[in-house]
Structure formats: C-alpha cells, structure tokens
Amino acid sequence: MNFHAFILADFFRDPGLYFSLGLIVIVLLVSLAEGLQLEKELGLASLRGFVQLSLVGFVLVWIFSFENLWVVFGVLIVMTFLAGLIAKKRGEGIPKVFPIVVLALAVSLSLTLSLLVLGGSIQAQARFLIPLGGMVLGNSMNGAGLTLNRLKSEMDLRRPEILVYLSLGASNRQSVQKILKEVLRASLIPAIDTMKALGVIFMPGMMAGLIIAGKSPLLAVRYQIIVMFMLLASAALTNLIVVLLGYRQFFTPHQQLKNLSEAA
C-alpha cells in the first residue's frame, strides 16, 4: 500500500506534467482567437486522455507486480475484444464482422508475439507482452477498420461488375479477385510508406523514447526495427484475414451476391 502511495505521489510531483498542460492552453487560446469553437471538445479530449492514460499506468503497475502469464493473457484477450468492437464499426452492415475482426486480430497478435518470444527478441513477461501487444492491436485495429471500410465501399460501387462476372459463370472468389487485390494493396501502402521514411524523415516513438531514457542509439535502432517489422507483418496478416473472410459475407451459400445496402 505504501509502495503504491509512493508511486502515486511521485507521478503527480513531476513538474513537467503540469508544464505540458501549457501546450494545451496555447491550443485553446488559438481556438478562442480564431473562433474555431473547439474549446469544449479539446478540453474534454485532453482530460479523457489524461485520465485514461493515468489509469492504464497504475493498472499496469498492479499487473506487473503479479508476473503471472495467465493474467497477461487475460489482459490481452480483453484488449483484443475491445479493439474488435472499435474496428467493426467501419464494417457496419457486413454480417459476422465482429467475430471476423476478433479472429484476425487474435491470430496476428498470437503469431507476432510468439515469434518474438521464440526468437529471443523479448521475454515472456508482462512488461514486454502487454505494451507490444497493445502496439500490435492498435496498429492492426486501424488497418482492419480501413480495410473493412474500403471493402464495403468497393463491393457496393462495383456491384454491376461483379454481377457480370457471376453471370458469365465465375465463382464468387473469381468475381471479386481484382477488388480483393486492390483493397489489400491499398491497406498496406501506409505501412510501406512509413517503412520507407523510417529514420530519414521521422524518428519513431520507441527509438526516441529509448534514446531520451539514456539507452544506446544502436540498441534503440534494433528495438525499433523489430517493432516496425512486427507492425507491418501483423497489419498485413490482419488485413489478409479480414479480406478473405469478409468478402464471403457478401454472397449467399449459392454464390449469389447479396444486397447488403438494402438489408441495412
């Protein structure tokens, strides 16, 4: 109890925490001066972010004190379901979209973390698995959401083209093959562009954080490379699963194209 009280006092004693609020005040003043009417939204967003991150920090301190892998797995499962709930909103109207997203996130998360542990890049401990798992889920969640949105819009816009293919005897997969390739390609372009600019145009968060913490730049680079490869691979796998399972929901068992816009 004394230990946690010490952490709480030390957390709020940092003057940098309060000086950083000055940056938010500057933005609020700009909004007032320019009549943007974002003061309420910005204030609430800042307060919510502060409270959420603070609570997460104290919860992680509590979780790390257990060093129990079952607790870690439980946390990662909850995080996966929450990420699925957020991502599924982009694919609203697609049948079974929630289990598809959760499955895709779970597979990419499990495979990525397992390879990192087996390769000796990280240890099977809460302080590695939860932060890196959160990075994987956050990145994959955004990719899955954008992929679902693009898939849904393309299937709707190119409905006549798909019907022509079906009328000529094509299977459901053959009728949407070009669409699936375009959706997958578009979903991976942001991650690929980020890789191209890595270390040249911007210095990623983990690398910058380790250097600020006094670690060797080479150590920071090594961990950042691992993280970037991890995020790219997990996003690609998640998007692939979402696309391959998602397009099937647009067809009946008899390979007839559904009209999901009317059903919604």
Image: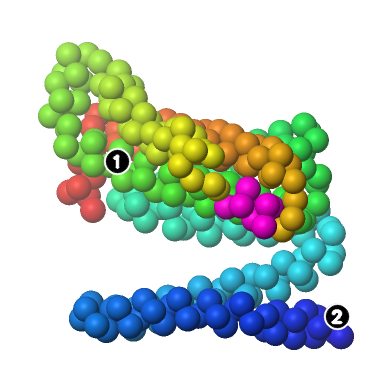
Q: Which residue is mark 1?
A: 150
The stretch drawn in magenta includes residue 209 = yes
Give the magenta-colored segment's residue range: 205-212
With 241 as the anchor, is 219 left or right in this view? Answer: right
Nearer to me, 11 or 123: 11
Which residue was labeled with disc 2? 3
Whether residue 101 appears in this view of the structure is no
Q: Is residue 3 above or below residue 105?
A: below
Decide which of tag 1 and tag 2 comes sooner along the chain. Answer: 2
Residue 118 drawn in magenta: no
* Residue drawn 67% across the image and 70% down it: 57
Amino acid bearing label 1: Arg
User: Which one is closest to the eye, mark 1 or mark 2?
Assistant: 2
Position of residue 51 in the picture relative to residue 255 (left or right):
right
How packed mark 2 is, by other alpha carbons closer than 10 Å (few <14, some 14-19, many 20 or more), is few
- From the viewer's side, name the closer residue of 114 and 264: 114
Q: What's the residue type where badge 2 is placed?
A: Phe
The residue positioned 20% from the left and 81% from the top of the image is: 35
Residue 10 relative to residue 166: left or right: right
Give the image quarter of residue 7. Answer: bottom right
Q: Is residue 258 visible?
A: yes
Residue 12 placed where, x, y %?
67, 84
Query: Quarter of the image holding residue 192?
Result: top left
Mark-to-mark CA distance, 1 and 2: 49 Å
In the rendered image of this protein, does residue 22 appear above or below residue 193? below
Q: Residue at x 76, y 69 (%)?
A: 61
Q: Element under label 1?
A: helix
Above or below: residue 113 compared with residue 210: above
